[in-house]
Amino acid sequence: MASSKRSPVHAPGRAGMPRRAYAVGAIAVALAAALSGCAPEPDDHPEPKPETRSPKTEPAPTAAPTPTPAPEPSPTPTFDAQAHSIDDPMSIWVVSNKLRPLNPVDFVPSDLVMPEGVVNANGQPLREPAARAVERLIADAAAAGHPVQILSAFRDSALQTSLYESYIARDGQAAADTYSARPGHSEHQTGLTVDFDDGSGCALEACFGGTAAGTWIAEHAAEYGFIVRYPDGKQDITGFMPEPWHFRYVGPELAGEMRDRGVSTLEEFFGLPAAPDYAD
Ligand SMILES: [Zn+2]
C-alpha cells in the first residue's frame, strides 16, 4: 500500500471535536505496509468429524460383557450462515462496503439507543444490541485496567456527507476515499460500529492497535460480538486502511466463527467480491 495521507479518519462529529486528532493536517504515516499479511488466511476450516468409532467386535474375554460406553457425539454447535441477512440494513450481519451501499442510502436504524454508563465523546447512539454489548465490553475492559471511551458511533448520512466533503476539500477525493466512506457506504451509518479511544494519544491513529487497551479489545472483541472491521493487510478487500480502533458489532456467533476460522473480513467470510474501490 502506498503511503497515504494519514489523518483523522472517523472524526466523530464536529461537536466537541476532542483533541488534536481531528485538527491535525495530513500526517504522513508510513502506514502499515509492513503489517500487511498479518491476518491468517481463511483455511477450509475442517469440521471436526465426530469419530464414528464402531465398537470393535472384540471377543468378549469373559461371559460378562462390559457395556461399551456410547460414543459421545461431541456437540459442536452448528453455525448457521443463513441466520441473518447481509443485505438488510437492519440485520446485524449487513455488509456495507464500497460496492454495497446501504439501501436506502439514507438509512436510519429504528432501534438507536444511548449506551449507558460509558464515556461517549460525541454522544452518538448505537443500535440496541450493539449498545448493550459495548456497555459490557467497556466495563470489562475497565475492570481489566483499560478504561476506554466511545469516540464515535452512529452517524447519519447527512453527517457523513459533511465529513466526507470536508475531507475531500482538505485531501482530495482519492485520499479521502481511503479513510472516509461516502454517505450510504459508512459502517457508522449501520448503528453497529464504535470507534474506541483510551486517551493515550492514539485516537483514530494506527498506534491505537499497539496500546494496552487496543490490544485487550482486539483480543476480547469477539466475546462481545465485535470484529475489527478493517484489519491490517486487508485494504484491497475492505477498501479501507487498517483501523484498529473501529469495531463492528456482528453478534458473538459470527464474531466467534470468524475468529475460529481465522477469517478476518466480512467480505471473505461471506464470499463477497473484494471492494477496494467504488464502482463509479
Ligand atoms: Zn470508525
Image (cartoon, rainbow, N blue to C red):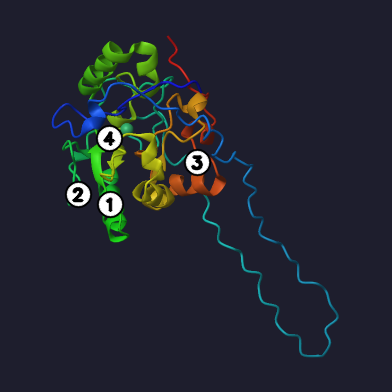
- Three-letter amino acid code at the position of disc 4: Gly
Percent position (x, y) of residue 115? Answer: 20, 46
Label 4, secondary structure: give it: loop
**How far is the residue under mark 1 from the one under mark 3?**
28 Å
- Three-letter amino acid code at the position of disc 3: Ala
Tell me the residue at 49%/20% (across/down).
2
What residue would you read off at disc 1?
A: 138
- Three-letter amino acid code at the position of disc 1: Ile
Q: Quadrant of ligand 1?
A: top left
Q: N-terminal of the two: label 3 or label 2?
A: 3
What residue would you read off at disc 3?
A: 81
Other residues around mark 1 within 10 Å, as few (<14) / some (14–19) / many (≥20): many
Percent position (x, y) of residue 123? Answer: 16, 38
| Disc 2 + disc 1, Cβ < 8 Å | yes
Other residues around mark 4 within 10 Å, as few (<14) / some (14–19) / many (≥20): many
Q: N-terminal of the two: label 4 or label 3?
A: 3
**How far is the residue under mark 4 from the one under mark 3?**
22 Å
What residue would you read off at disc 2?
A: 118
Residue 155 seen in render: no
* Front disc: 4 or 3: 4
